[in-house]
Every structure is written in structure tokens, then in C-alpha cells.
Amino acid sequence: MKKFSGIAIITVIVAGAFVTTDAVGSAIDLMALIFVFGIGIGHSMSARANESAITRFGDGCVRAGWLGLLVGLVIMTSTLEPRLDAMLPAIAVALLTPLYGYFFKILAMQLD
């Protein structure tokens, strides 16, 4: 029960940070979420017999977050025109992947 209470508290605090600043829409990007969650699942599937799949999932999500940031930066620098008003929303989306990665990692730590 304590694990799920901890998960609820963490989720409410993170969500509350976006809700209180009216930035909920900027915190949600389905492709970034699928990217991080999918790589985390794939990483958990390679857990050895003496490893926790949940720990592997959390570690994979963090790595996927940083990989997603790099992928986003490569896409931005190769396709966007060099105008700040065009780049800032793309940078915000690219920064979501490490956020998602660490969020899933902290949740996985609660479950493990």
C-alpha cells in the first residue's frame, strides 16, 4: 500500500507542477511518451535471471529519454529553419523525453 501511495504522491506533485502553471498541454507529447515507454519495455525484456525487470525498465526509460533528446536535436537542426520562434516549441518537445524517462524511473524505483 505504501508503494502505491508513494506513486500517487509523486504523480500528483509532477502533474500539479504543470497544472498550476497552465502548461499541461506542453507536458504531453504522445510520440515522446511512446518512444521512452517502448524503449523502457524493450530494455526490461533483456533482464537476466538475477535482475529485476522493473529496475531494467526504469534504467531503459532514462536512457531512452536522453536518446530521445539527441534524436530530437538532430531532427531540429536538420529540418527547422534557424528562427527562435520555430525552434523553441521543438526544444520543449525534445526536453520531454528525459522528463518522461526520469519520471518512469522514479516510479519503477517505487515498485522495485
Image (tube, rainbow, N blue to C red):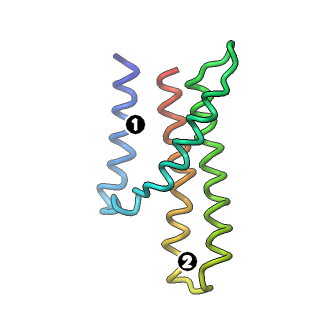
Q: Residue at image x 43%, y 58%?
A: 29
Residue 17 drawn at (x, y percent): 36, 52
Mark number displayed over residue 87 = 2
Mark number displayed over residue 10 = 1
| Helix, strand or loop under label 1 | helix
Q: Between marks 1 and 2, how big is the CA–CA gap?
A: 31 Å
Residue 19 drawn at (x, y percent): 30, 55
Q: Residue at image x 37%, y 18%?
A: 2
Q: Of the residues shown, which amino acid type is indicated by label 1?
A: Ile
| Helix, strand or loop under label 2 | helix
Nearest the eye: 96 or 17: 96
Task: Check the image and report above or below for 78 versus 15.
Answer: below
In the picture, residue 72 is in which quadrant? bottom right
Which quadrant is home to the N terminus?
top left
> Position of 26 compared to 41: left or right?
left
Indicate which label's residue lies in the foreground, 1 or 2.
2
Nearest the eye: 34 or 86: 34
Residue 86 drawn at (x, y percent): 52, 81
Q: Which of marks 1 and 2 is nearer the N terminus?
A: 1
